[in-house]
Image (spheres, rainbow, N blue to C red):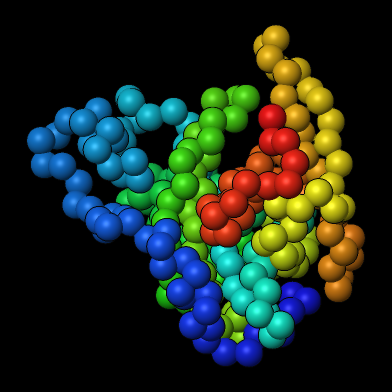
Amino acid sequence: MDSNGFGESQRLVDLVQPLRPSKPLCPPSNTNNNPKAESETNPIAKPSDRTRPKRAAVLICLFEDENGHLRVILTKRASTLSTNSGDVSLSGGKTEEGDANDIETALREAKEEIGLDPSLVDVVTVLEPIVTKIGMAVVPVLGILADIRQFNPTPNAAEVEAIFDAPLDMFLKDENRREEEREWMGNKYLLHFFDNEAENGKYVIWGLTAGILIAAASLVYQRPPDFQIA
């Protein structure tokens, strides 16, 4: 990690307070044994295998550095992985049988991949799922780390090559950004690439991860990016 924390940040807590839902993020599951109804009323509930698409969750973990800037924890995937090897990503992965909900998936994966203790993360809200080209519903879970000094990064070498962080507001600025127009099934879209220089290397944040962070930054700062999204 390239940023040294300075203790609990009340500013960070206050900034994300408006994002917290009025109802609990993990309400009790319905008792009517109707998986379809449960998945419609509770977007982070765990539907049955018969009704759910392939599902995954990622953790957008924010903290405030010593200069008062919000930063997000990111990883570089191991080059030995069969998919998206070497890419920058948020900690996360596929839902497993024992996961109660998307929050649990994201926190479990973060602990397995980078050694982040779930008890250190204050989950603020859950963003809308993003369905990928292969039909995977990826659910971004937004949480804050009140004191970055309590996090001792321990990357799982089988999955993670490096752990670093980047400024959250970078994903609203047109600086250090480039784009490419792509086409999928007849529909054109913009693919965003952000160049980030960290203490332990230079990284390119793009694709799904960049899209999630653009949405998260827009939500936290309550403003659109300085560039066209799509």
Q: Quadrant of the C terminus?
A: top right
The residue positioned 62% from the left and 86% from the top of the image is 149
> Horizontal and vertical percent for residue 52?
38, 29
Q: Nearer the viewer, residue 222 or 198?
A: 222
The residue positioned 43% from the left and 51% from the top of the image is 126
Left or right of 180? Residue 1 is left
Looking at the rendered structure, the number of numbered marks drawn on it comes to: 0
Residue 74 appears in the picture as rendered:
no
Q: Quadrant of residue 64?
A: bottom right
Q: Residue furthest left?
A: 32
> Horizontal and vertical percent for residue 115?
59, 71
Check the image and report above or below for 63 versus 34.
below
Q: Quadrant of residue 181?
A: top right
The residue positioned 74% from the left and 64% from the top of the image is 166
Q: Residue furthest top?
A: 186
The residue positioned 50% from the left and 69% from the top of the image is 15
> Horizontal and vertical percent for residue 187?
68, 14
Left or right of 21? Residue 37 is left
Check the image and report above or below for 117 versus 83.
below
> Horizontal and vertical percent for residue 18?
41, 62
Residue 128 appears in the picture as rendered:
yes
Q: Quadrant of the N terminus?
A: bottom right
